[in-house]
């Protein structure tokens, strides 16, 4: 009887172990695979929409930035040269899980790229495409570029900070100063910290350094190799 009980317990443990392994495989492999497919689709659709002329007959450059974007729809691209010379990902509206499975998400009610206020973006650091897996490598002085249909907005990073998940002040128009009127175009990138947990948040803050028309070509930082660590 004892032998039967031990055998039964062993079988349960083996089954539980297999379930855990399948779940880990799903999180580490399948969610990334699905997210990368979704991201590629959003990026392709967005580029195609920018190339199409407007219904009015004007060229693509006639529309300046998104007036209103549906949740889950792409409207810009984010370029972070520190994470790789060709590192780029679409920015979609919204930060719910379905939105973040398509790229990085723009926090609703925060500023648009290049606008006065706080352009705030969230991204996964592990699983679901993990676009911000190595966001901790970004440092003060690095450049981050937001690309819209008509313009390039280059931000320079000012600082990084580890905060609690309840620190919503990072999304304020002037982070940490809820009553202050914004006078500067700011950037805030948010992700989980440490990479394989979620009990903290890694925050990267920056400010707008340059606005450049698409017709003038991409900013220099996207054309030259990133400096070494």
Image: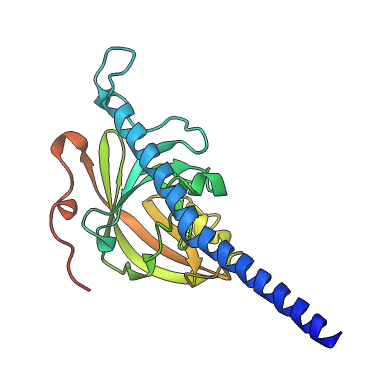
Q: Nearer the viewer, residue 85 or 139?
A: 85
- The x and y percentages for residue 88 are 30, 50
Residue at x 26% of width, y 63% of height: 82
Quadrant containing the C terminus is: bottom left
The correct choice, above or below, for 108 with respect to 82 in the image is above
Quadrant containing the N terminus is: bottom right
Residue at x 18% of width, y 71% of height: 228
Of all residues, the one furthest to the bottom in this rendering is 2
When asked about the image quadrant of residue 22, the answer is bottom right
Of all residues, the one furthest to the right in this rendering is 1
- The x and y percentages for residue 150 are 26, 33
The correct choice, above or below, for 54 with respect to 163 in the image is above
- The x and y percentages for residue 221 are 18, 55
Residue 96 seen: no
Of all residues, the one furthest to the top in this rendering is 56
- The x and y percentages for residue 160 are 40, 69
Q: Is residue 16 left or right of residue 216?
A: right
Q: Nearer the viewer, residue 46 or 159?
A: 46
When asked about the image quadrant of residue 50, the answer is top left
Q: Nearer the viewer, residue 221 or 199?
A: 199
Q: In the rendered view, how is the structure colored?
A: rainbow
Q: Is residue 218 left or right of residue 52?
A: left
- Say how many tags the image has: 0
The correct choice, above or below, for 79 with respect to 215 in the image is below
Residue at x 31% of width, y 38% of height: 148
Residue 12 seen: yes
Q: Nearer the viewer, residue 167 or 179?
A: 167
């Amino acid at each position: 009887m004892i032998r039967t009980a031990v055998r039964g317990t062993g079988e349960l443990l083996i089954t539980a172990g297999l379930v855990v392994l399948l779940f880990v495989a799903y999180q580490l492999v399948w969610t990334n695979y699905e997210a990368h497919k979704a991201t590629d689709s959003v990026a392709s659709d967005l580029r195609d929409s920018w190339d199409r002329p407007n219904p009015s007959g004007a060229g693509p450059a006639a529309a300046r930035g998104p007036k209103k974007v549906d949740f889950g729809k792409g409207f810009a691209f984010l370029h972070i040269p520190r994470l790789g010379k060709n590192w780029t990902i679409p920015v979609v509206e919204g930060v719910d899980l379905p939105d973040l499975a398509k790229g990085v998400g723009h926090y609703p009610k925060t500023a648009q790229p290049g606008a006065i206020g706080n352009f705030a973006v969230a991204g996964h650091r592990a699983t679901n495409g993990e676009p911000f897996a190595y966001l901790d490598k970004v440092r003060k002085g690095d450049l981050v570029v937001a690309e819209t249909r008509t313009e390039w907005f280059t931000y320079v990073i000012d600082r990084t900070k580890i905060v609690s998940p309840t620190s919503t002040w990072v999304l304020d128009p002037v982070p940490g100063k809820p009553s202050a009127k914004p006078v500067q175009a700011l950037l805030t990138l948010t992700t989980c910290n440490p990479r394989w947990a979620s009990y903290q948040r890694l925050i990267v803050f920056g400010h707008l350094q340059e606005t450049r028309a698409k017709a003038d070509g991409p900013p220099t930082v996207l054309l030259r190799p990133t400096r070494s660590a």
